[in-house]
Image: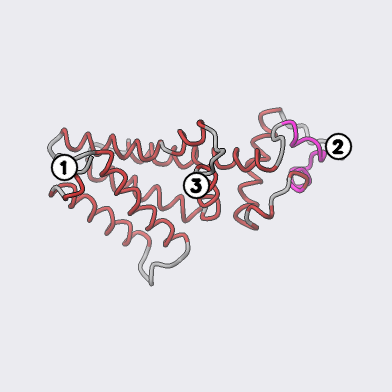
Amino acid sequence: MTDQPYHHGKLREALLGRAMETIEEAGVDGLSLRQLARDVKVSHGAPAKHFRDKQALVDAVALAGFESMNRRILDAAQSGEDLRERFVSVGKAYVDFAVDHPALLTVMYSTKHHPDSSEELRSTGAQGIHVARAMIAEAQQAGVLAAGDPETLAMVCFVSLHGTALLAAGGQLDGNSVEYVVTATTDTLWAGMAAGVPAAQLN
């Protein structure tokens, strides 16, 4: 097969894009470097120039997934002046990403938490919760939220929204719309942090 005239960086991009699509269509088990090569119309050895094996490809897909999700979260976090509205927007961005990419989200977190995951992947995968922590600290300094440990509060927010995201992605919201459940979740979290829940005192 004659390789398509991909620029070096563009071929890697094309392979990652097609790998993400394959994960949504057939899961990780459906991934193969040879099939990816056929899908993007390059020689079967071309992907090896970018990914030494399937695990390296999965690692790169997970990293690219977190980078894409982080861009959505950062955009939402910077979407306006009102702190509560920005918080709600971040929650919606996270859940919307999960609904758009349910299988990819699972691969992202399972790869991140693998004992052999890279420092780059773990760091990139933690950026979302860092954004939440910074927003909570900003709201506390502004007097909008009660005092408390921002790291603990960000963790509680993440756990709540991740659960919402998984249920939404699986279509398991018992007839409720995604928007309704996300709004209810973020409103409850914000109200608790404004009131000063006991968890805020944990260190």
| Element class at badge 3 | helix
Front-lying residue, 131 or 198: 198
Whichever of callouts 3 and 2 sits on the residue coming sooner in the sequence is 2
Asked if residue 113 lies in the magenta stretch, the reply is no
Residue 153, image quadrant: top left
Q: Could you tell me how far apart the alpha carbons at marks 3 and 2 are, in whole angstroms?
A: 36 Å
What amino acid does circle 2 point to? Thr
Residue 114, percent from left and from top: 54, 43
| Element class at badge 2 | loop
Front-lying residue, 2 or 15: 15
What amino acid does circle 3 point to? Tyr
Q: Which residue is mark 1?
A: 145
Residue at the farthest top position? 8
Residue at the farthest right position? 1
Would residue 194 be found to the left or right of residue 23 on screen? left
Relative to 138, residue 157 above or below: below
Q: Could you tell me how far apart the alpha carbons at marks 1 and 2 are, in whole angstroms?
A: 60 Å
Would residue 190 be found to the left or right of residue 154 on screen? left
Relative to 20, residue 80 above or below: above
Identify the magenta region. 35-49
Q: Which residue is mark 3?
A: 109
Residue at the farthest bottom position? 175
Residue 127, percent from left and from top: 40, 36
Q: Residues within 10 Å of mark 1 (few under 14, many from 20)?
A: many
What amino acid does circle 1 point to? Leu
The color scheme shown is secondary structure
Q: Nearer the viewer, mark 1 or mark 3?
A: 3
Q: Could you tell me how far apart the alpha carbons at marks 1 and 3 are, in whole angstroms?
A: 30 Å
Q: Which residue is mark 2?
A: 2
